[in-house]
Image (spheres, helix red, strand yellow):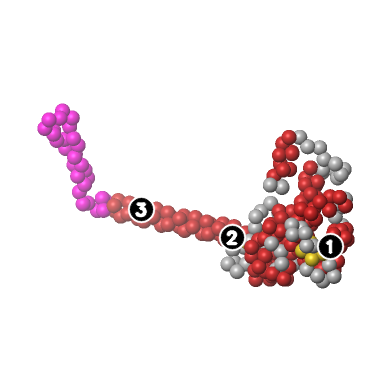
Amino acid sequence: MFNMGFNQKQGYGMPQMGIQMQNTPQNMSVEMEMSNMMNDMVGITNNMMGEMVAINNTMMGGMMGMAGAMMGGMMSAVDPQAVARFNALDSDHSGTISVQEIQKAYQKFNFPAQSAQLLLKAISDETYIDIETFPVFDQYLVSFYNVFMKFSMGQMSAQAPQVQQAVRMLNFQVKQPILMALIQKYDTDHRGVEFGEFLSICSYLLIVDKLMEKFDPRDSGKITLDKNDLQALGLWFL
């Protein structure tokens, strides 16, 4: 049962209502039911939170699994021997190798970092070598070295006729006057073309081939440039 009374608070004209609940069996039963309802609501809320956490964990696990599968697929697409060599060079396990690290790894090839940087520029838009770039970089580098050593007769430098033969064997299409100009440009000491200088010549020719693919998609052998194209082209040789 409820006893209701009205009290007039001094200073205010509005009455206040006071409510008192007596401890009767009926009231105690109502309180028990309300307590049980609150416990049920807490239990339902906890269950919902647990299910939400489980769903989030499942989603995160799925996303991590997909990322791992993508990385695994990328690694499996590369020659296992190349992966092993890359990991051996990647001493800090950063997933990338600098040109300076490559230069140290191929010490017997004896080429400057600038030549390696030019080769990297010919095959990638990045300034570092990753697991995808490394096999291509390695293949070009080893091929250039083997051809150079073949026509230099195992010597550390080659003369212009030998360089011309080596370039032809690598299937570069370049006229003799242009090749001679490249030899003069990169053979700075004029004591014969060393491998590092030969690497720069081949890398330059690779860059030209790459630019032809970009500006001559129809493979016509000719390109037409507007001012914007010329500005973009010039960036490759700065």
Residue under label 2, please give it: 64
- For the residue labelled by badge 2, is the local secondary structure a helix, a strand or a loop? helix
Q: Residues within 10 Å of mark 2 (few under 14, many from 20)?
A: few
**Is residue 196 covered in magenta?**
no
Q: Mark 2 or mark 3: name the one nearer the start of the chain.
A: 3
Residue 69 can be seen in this image: no
* Amino acid type at image mark 2: Met
Residue nearest the viewer, comparing 8 with 104: 104
Please identify, in this view, whether the residue under mark 2 or under mark 3 is nearer the observer.
2
Q: Closer to the N terminus: mark 1 or mark 3?
A: 3
How far apart are the alpha carbons under marks 1 and 2?
56 Å
Type of residue at label 3?
Met
Residue 223 in the figure: left or right of residue 15: right
The magenta segment is 1-28
Query: Of 223 and 87, which appears nearest the observer?
Result: 223
Label annotation for residue 122: none
Which residue lies under the disc numbered 3?
38
